[in-house]
Image (cartoon, rainbow, N blue to C red):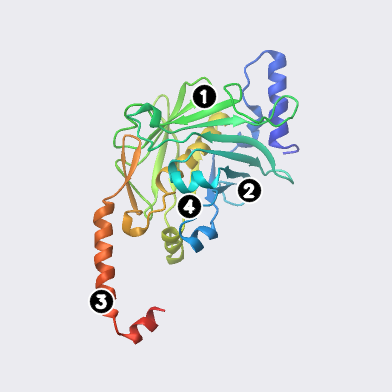
C-alpha cells in the first residue's frame, strides 16, 4: 500500500459523505485480498517474574503465512482494572496499521467491564465494538460513538449459546451478519480449540483456531504464560469490516478462555462454557489433589539434602 490505512480510511469516509453514499469502509482495503491471518499475543516477562502483576496485552497480526506484519494491537487500561477485574475487565485496544514504514493508529476495539460475562443477565454479557479513529480532517477522535462504529461482536443475550460458546458479529446497524461457534461445552488450553464462523444462512465461511503446542518448549510456555497464537481463516469475499470484527472476536476468545491467572492446579487447562460464562473445570478438586501431592512430596523430601539439591 502506498498510503497508510488510517489516511485511506479518512479519504474513503469523506468521499462517501460527499456522494451521499453509505460508507463501505474501503479504507480497510488491506484486508480485501486476505483470506486469513495469524494472531500472536506477545509474551509479558514481568508477569512471569512477579507471578501476580498483569501487564497490558499486546497482539501482532500477520498474514496467513506468518511473515508479513499487518497490524499491532495494544491494550489501554489502568493497573487497577487489570489486577482487580482480570479477564472481565473493560479495555480500549488500539489497532495500529503496520503496512507502511511507521505505525499509524487506525482503529480501536472497545469493551466495557462486565462482572462475569453471563448472558442470562443482559447487563453482564460481553460486547466488543470496533470504531475508526480519524475524522474527515485527519484528526484523531478522542471518544467513540455510534457515528464511528464499524462493527461489533456480542454474546447472544439470554442464552449465550447455552453449552456452546457463541458470538454474533453485527454490522454497524446492529444486524447479525455472521456467527462464531466454538467446541461444545469444554475448551482446552493445551489441546487447542476450533471456533467455526457461519454466515446468516448457516454456511461455514471460516474459523478461528487456538493453536495447540507442538513441542515441550511450547507446552512449557503454554503452562507458564498467557501468550497464545491463533490462526484465523475466512472467506475472501466477506466485507473488510466483518473481517475486522472477526479479528476483534479473536481477542474476545483469548480474554474469555486463555487470559486467566489460574495455575494448572486450579483448572487452567480446561474451561466449561455455560450461557456466556467460562467456568474453570472442578477447580476445588484439582486444587485439593495438588495440595495433597505437594504435602506428600515435602514429607518425603524432609531431611534429605541430596533430594533438595537435585530439585535445585
Locate the C terminus by quadrant. bottom left
Please give left or right for residue 186 compared with residue 74 in the image.
left
Which of pointers 4 and 3 indicates the residue nearer the eye? 3
Q: Secondary structure at mark 4?
A: loop
Please tell me whether residue 287 is drawn above or below residue 58 in the rendered image: below
Q: Which residue is mark 3?
A: 299
Say which of 161 and 226 sits in front: 226
Mark 2 or mark 4, which is nearer the start of the sequence? Answer: 2
Please give left or right for residue 211 compared with residue 148 in the image.
left
Which of pointers 1 and 2 indicates the residue nearer the eye? 1
Which of pointers 4 and 2 indicates the residue nearer the eye? 4
Please tell me whether residue 124 is drawn above or below residue 21 in the rendered image: below
Mark 1 or mark 4, which is nearer the start of the sequence? Answer: 1
Q: Secondary structure at mark 3?
A: helix
Residue found at x 69% / y 34%? 6
Instruction: State yes or no: discs 3 and 2 in contact (Cβ < 8 Å).
Output: no
Instruction: State yes or no: discs 4 and 2 in contact (Cβ < 8 Å).
Output: no
Q: Which residue is mark 1?
A: 171
Please give left or right for residue 249 compared with residue 308 in the image.
right
Q: Which residue is mark 4?
A: 228
Amino acid at each position: 500500500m502506498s498510503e497508510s490505512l488510517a489516511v485511506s480510511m479518512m479519504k474513503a469516509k469523506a468521499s462517501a459523505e460527499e456522494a451521499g453514499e453509505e460508507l463501505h469502509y474501503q479504507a480497510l482495503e488491506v484486508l480485501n485480498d486476505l483470506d486469513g491471518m495469524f494472531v500472536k499475543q506477545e509474551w509479558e516477562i514481568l508477569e512471569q517474574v512477579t507471578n501476580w502483576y498483569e501487564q497490558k496485552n499486546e497482539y501482532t497480526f500477520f498474514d496467513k503465512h506468518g511473515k508479513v506484519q499487518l497490524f499491532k494491537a495494544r491494550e489501554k487500561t489502568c493497573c487497577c482494572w487489570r489486577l482487580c477485574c482480570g479477564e472481565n475487565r473493560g479495555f480500549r485496544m488500539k489497532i495500529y496499521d503496520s503496512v507502511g514504514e511507521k505505525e499509524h493508529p487506525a482503529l480501536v476495539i472497545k469493551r466495557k467491564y462486565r462482572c462475569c460475562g453471563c448472558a442470562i443477565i443482559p447487563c453482564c454479557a460481553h460486547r466488543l465494538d470496533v470504531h475508526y479513529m480519524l475524522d474527515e480532517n485527519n484528526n484523531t477522535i478522542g471518544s467513540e460513538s455510534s457515528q464511528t462504529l464499524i462493527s461489533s461482536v456480542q454474546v447472544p443475550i439470554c442464552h449465550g449459546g447455552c453449552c456452546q460458546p457463541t458470538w454474533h458479529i453485527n454490522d454497524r446497524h446492529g444486524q447479525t451478519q455472521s456467527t462464531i461457534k466454538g467446541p461444545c461445552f469444554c475448551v482446552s488450553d493445551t489441546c487447542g480449540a476450533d471456533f467455526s464462523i457461519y454466515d446468516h444462512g448457516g454456511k461455514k465461511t471460516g474459523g478461528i483456531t487456538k493453536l495447540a503446542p507442538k513441542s515441550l518448549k511450547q507446552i512449557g510456555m503454554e503452562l507458564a504464560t498467557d501468550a497464545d497464537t491463533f490462526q484465523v481463516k475466512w472467506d475472501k469475499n466477506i466485507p473488510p469490516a466483518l473481517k475486522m470484527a472477526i479479528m476483534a472476536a479473536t481477542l474476545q476468545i483469548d480474554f474469555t478462555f486463555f487470559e486467566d491467572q489460574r495455575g494448572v492446579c486450579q483448572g487452567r487447562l480446561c474451561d466449561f462454557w455455560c450461557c456466556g460464562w467460562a467456568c474453570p473445570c472442578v477447580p476445588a478438586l484439582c486444587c485439593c489433589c495438588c495440595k495433597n501431592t505437594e504435602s506428600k512430596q515435602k514429607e518425603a523430601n524432609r531431611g534429605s539434602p541430596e533430594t533438595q539439591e537435585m530439585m535445585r
